[in-house]
Amino acid sequence: MAVVASDPDVVVVGAGPNGLTAAVVLAMAGRRVLVVEAAPTPGGGTRSAELTLPGFVHDVCSAIHPLGLASPALRSLPLADHGLRWVHPDVPLAHVVDGEAPAILHRSVEDTADGLGPEDGPVWRALFGSLVDAGTALSDGLLSPLAIPPRHPVALARFGPPGILSASRLGRRFASARGSGLFAGLAAHSILSLRAPATAGYGLMLGMLAHRVGWPMAEGGSQRIADALVSLLAAHGGSVECGREVRSLAELPSTATVLLDLTPRQVIAIAGDRLPDRYRGRLARFRYGPGVHKVDWALDGPVPWTDPAVAGAGTVHLGGSLAEVAAGEEDVMQGRHPERPFVLLAQPSRFDPSRAPDGRHTVWAYCHVPAGSTVDMTDRIEDRIEAHAPGFRDRILARHVMGPAAMERYDANYIGGHINGGAGDLRQFVARPTLGLHPWRTPVEGLYLCSSSTPPGPGVHGMCGWHAAHEVLAHAD
Ligand SMILES: Cc1cc2nc3c(=O)[nH]c(=O)nc-3n(C[C@H](O)[C@H](O)[C@H](O)COP(=O)(O)OP(=O)(O)OC[C@H]3O[C@@H](n4cnc5c(N)ncnc54)[C@H](O)[C@@H]3O)c2cc1C
């Protein structure tokens, strides 16, 4: 695509949100930056395409971006000047439970608590009120690297004690299926057993962000996030070369600083011969996690939800109570395929008409599956939707299905279909991918890591790239 910088002093391998953010920061600091990308288009996990029918724009991977809006990196960049607009749904999330009214996660803590009623409203208020009051300091703290002393210690002190618990344990505070399920669905974004320590932290963070900044989508599709970063990069003299898979560091200019927007297994494949044995061994022990089975639909009308409140939600979780969500996720951890999987669904065209022709709609959904699974979960996902939206299947004009193998073919970072850049359990939260205060550096001079396999981990926030770029700049000073 863009003109290749002829003599780059920085090469970034991988044009995902982290690679592009790193590239932008370094280009803005005056470096000549080239990004090399294997896929035909830039963006990695933040790309969109007409996967089903002409005129239907689907987000191939990420769709909902609280982390993007909260990110200190993306906040600081003039991405609006490069075409990025956030669209907010009426409410961030609806969690549906069989036989009951859906639990609605509103922007306001009070409205959410009121909706959960006297049983669970006070629990929600107690858990989220003080986190939301902690303000930007808390989200900034959570997206910052581990530091001694910690950044934003007061805000983090509010988060730490409940956040370190398992979601199953913290979720016991809720009495109803609606309250516990709403919390469990948030925590299940961790793609871990909900009995694992610190899974409550995922639920608290995502709920807190819904209240603080919302769960928006990018107008026109997630691709616009990547396009804005590429445009900003170009404005600072950088360029992206797509369709070029890097197989060895030897292919890159020997004088350039190199940042790899890749996971440890790929880093070993590309740079293994340069890595000291001990470091390579640590990377080799890095663990991945379950994969995803994703379906995109083109519909000839909106999803016919039984409860109209669900129609106003950008994201819908189909999962039931905490016990049901936890059991389904536990099945996946144990290598099984749940009959009734926990389903994460987004309905962007409800709020962004540019996604589909007039009156038509796009819907995006996935469930977790064992890594490398070849089981087609499409029917089970559609059954879950149909149960709360009878007539859904009749509205399908076309569907596009991606199991773990298709995910990995689409983006080599999704090893076995795992989308979080490596298991985000407590151990790999601290040692991501290796233990230390500068995990973006490698022992090889001029070689850095910048993917979601580094802190602060998965999501479209660009913070891994941001921290890596600042390591490069600090090292040069
Ligand atoms: C189905 C799905 C749903 C998701 N939903 C959300 C969501 O709603 N919100 C959210 O915040 N996050 C979501 N995510 C996660 C998010 O997409 C990732 O956390 C994020 O994209 C990670 O960014 P990254 O830059 O580290 O890596 P990636 O985005 O994976 O980018 C890595 C890039 O490197 C390229 N590459 C790999 N190997 C090579 C090579 N050898 N040579 C050259 N290039 C190479 C790849 O092609 C890719 O472009 C989702 C992911 C998936 C798959």
Image (cartoon, helix red, strand yellow):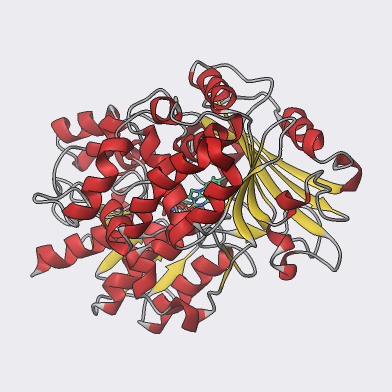
| Residue ID at (87%, 40%) | 393
User: How many marks are shown on the rendered structure?
Assistant: 0
Instruction: Locate the C terminus by quadrant.
Output: bottom left
| Residue 435 % position (x, y) | 17, 37
Residue placed most toward the observer, 363 or 39:
363
Residue placed most toward the observer, 58 or 26:
58
Q: Is residue 247 visible?
A: no
Residue placed most toward the observer, 215 or 218:
215
Q: Quadrant of residue 29?
A: bottom left
| Residue 257 % position (x, y) | 22, 62
Q: From what the image shows, is residue 51 above or below residue 283?
A: below
Residue sticking out furthest to the front: 118
Q: From what the image shows, is residue 381 above or below residue 324?
A: below
- Left or right of residue 267: residue 180: right
- Left or right of residue 340: residue 245: left
Q: From what the image shows, is residue 85 above or below residue 134?
A: below
- Left or right of residue 473: residue 6: right
Q: From what the image shows, is residue 221 above or below residue 382?
A: below
Q: Is residue 121 visible?
A: yes
| Residue 289 % position (x, y) | 44, 29
| Residue 17 % position (x, y) | 43, 59
| Residue ID at (50%, 15%) | 334
| Residue ID at (82%, 41%) | 389
